[in-house]
Image (cartoon, grey):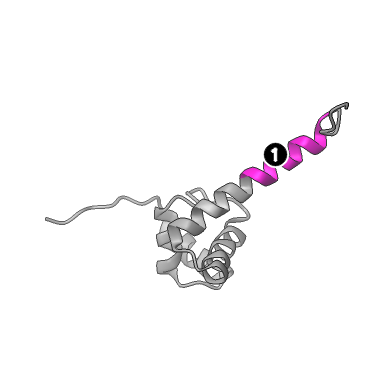
Amino acid sequence: MSLLVLQPAGYRSSVERLARDAGLHPDTVRQLIRLGLIAPPFPDDAAAQLARAVRLRRDLGLNFAGAVLACDLLARIDDLERRLARSPSNGRHPR
C-alpha cells in the first residue's frame, strides 16, 4: 500500500529554494517541516529558522526533534522578552 501526500502547488520548488538559502539538503528541510519547525506558506525568516535548528543540532548534539523543540522554546523566550520590553512598567516590579 502506498501513501499519497498532497502538497501545495509550488511546494517542491519552495523547499528547494529554502534548502539553497539555508545551505541545507532538501531532505533535511523536508524533515524539519515534518517535525513542525516551519509550515507553508513559509515565513520570511524560514531559511534562518532552518539554519538555526541545524546549528543547534550540530553544536549541542541534539536530534532534529530536540533542535525543533529548542527553536520553539527560544522563539517563545524572544516573544516574552519583546512583550516585557513593551510593557508600561518595563517589566520591573516595585520592591
Q: Please provide percent x and percent y for residue 34.
A: 39, 54
Q: Please provide percent x and percent y for residue 42.
A: 53, 51
Q: Quadrant of residue 84?
A: top right
User: What residue is drawn where x is 41% and y is 61%?
Assistant: 30
User: What residue is drawn where x is 20% and y is 53%?
Assistant: 3
> Which residue is at the far front?
95
The quadrant the C terminus occupies is top right
Q: How many marks?
A: 1
Q: Which one is nearer the viewer's eye here, 82 or 89?
A: 89
User: What residue is drawn where x is 57% and y is 56%?
Assistant: 46
Q: Please provide percent x and percent y for residue 7.
A: 36, 52
Residue 10 seen in this snapshot:
no
Residue 2 seen in this snapshot:
yes
Q: Classify mark 1: helix, strand or loop.
A: helix
**In this picture, which residue range is highlighted in magenta?**
76-87
**Amino acid at dot 1:** Leu
Q: Which residue is mark 1?
A: 80
84 up-or-down from 28: above or below: above
Is 56 covered by the magenta stretch?
A: no
Q: Residues within 10 Å of mark 1 (few under 14, many from 20)?
A: few
Q: Quadrant of residue 77?
A: top right
Is 85 covered by the magenta stretch?
A: yes
User: What residue is drawn where x is 68% and y is 41%?
Assistant: 79
The quadrant the N terminus occupies is bottom left
> Which residue is at the far left?
1
Q: Which one is nearer the viewer's eye here, 12 or 95?
A: 95
